Amino acid sequence: MVEWEQVMRRNEDREFMFFGSNEESVKILDRVIFFDALAD
């Protein structure tokens, strides 16, 4: 999960573009953002 957050922070816009085309990936993306918000 930590590695995922690091990737998201570095490539946020590009990851959104990529994951936007896959429902399962979107769910994972939402979880990453959720946990990232908790971390803050």
Image (cartoon, rainbow, N blue to C red):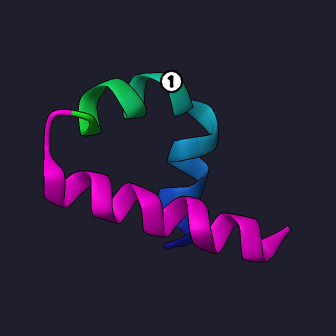
In which quadrant of the rendered image does the C terminus lie? bottom right
Say above or below: 13 vs 19: above
Circle 1 crowding by C-alpha within 10 Å: few under 14, some 14–19, many from 20: few
| x, y percent for residue 16 | 40, 32
**What span is in magenta?**
21-40
Q: Is residue 31 left or right of residue 28?
A: right
Amino acid tagged 1: Asp
Q: Residue at x 54, y 33 (%)?
A: 12
Instruction: Determine the secondary structure under disc 1.
Output: helix
Residue topped by disc 1: 13
Q: Quadrant of residue 21?
A: top left
Foreground pick, 22 / 14: 22
Say which residue appears at 29% left-offset and 52% top-offset.
Answer: 26
Magenta region, mostly helix, strand or loop?
helix
* 29 inside magenta stretch: yes
- Residue 28, position in %: x, y? 33, 64
Horizontal and vertical percent position of residue 18: 26, 30
The stretch drawn in magenta includes residue 37: yes
Q: Nearer the viewer, residue 7 or 19?
A: 19
